[in-house]
Amino acid sequence: MVALAIFVLVLPHSVVLPVFSLWALSAAACAALLAIFPLRRRTSYAGAAWDMAGAFTLVGCAAAILGEIEPIIEFIRPSGPRSKVND
């Protein structure tokens, strides 16, 4: 929730859901790595890490479905002068 609140305050509203989706999917990847590579032999957090990875994946996919890709493309695209040659 803190990340979503920061995204809402900092980013334009049209790109909040796609950015949140990318953030949630990267958090899911980090949680999956934490579950795959335990720091100690006898750890009990591997199951919880897989649950967190699944939850972040679900939230990330839902945000991707609800968000639209066009605002991200416009946000990333360079806004330099365009040539009319190829139009």
Image: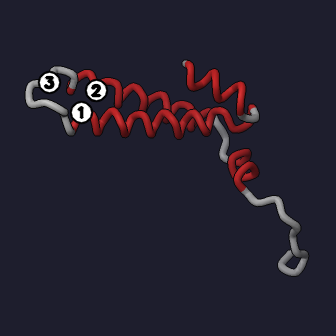
Residue farthest along the left direction in this orientation: 41
Residue at screen point 33% across, 32% down: 31
Could you tell me how far apart the alpha carbons at marks 3 and 1 are, in whole angstroms? 10 Å
Residue farthest along the front direction in this orientation: 40
Residue 41 x, y percent position in the rendering = 9, 30
Asked if disc 3 and disc 2 are in contact, CB closer than 8 Å, the reply is no
Q: Residues within 10 Å of mark 2 (few under 14, many from 20)?
A: some
Would you say 81 lies left or right of 28 here? Answer: right
Q: Name the residue that disc number 2 marks.
A: 49
Q: Secondary structure at mark 1?
A: helix
Q: Name the residue that disc number 1 marks.
A: 35
Residue 28 x, y percent position in the rendering = 39, 34
**Numbered label tally:** 3
Q: Earlier in the sequence, mark 3 or mark 2?
A: 3
Q: Amino acid at mark 3?
A: Thr
Tell which of 45 and 14 is nearer to you: 45
Could you tell me how far apart the alpha carbons at marks 3 and 2 are, in whole angstroms? 11 Å
Asked if disc 2 and disc 1 are in contact, CB closer than 8 Å, the reply is yes
Q: Residues within 10 Å of mark 1 (few under 14, many from 20)?
A: many
Residue at screen point 30% across, 36% down: 32
Is 75 above or below relative to 31? below
Q: Secondary structure at mark 2?
A: helix
Q: Name the residue that disc number 3 marks.
A: 43
Q: Residues within 10 Å of mark 3 (few under 14, many from 20)?
A: few
Q: Earlier in the sequence, mark 3 or mark 1?
A: 1
Q: Amino acid at mark 2?
A: Ala
Could you tell me how far apart the alpha carbons at marks 2 and 1 are, in whole angstroms? 5 Å
- On the image, which quarter does residue 11 sit in? top right
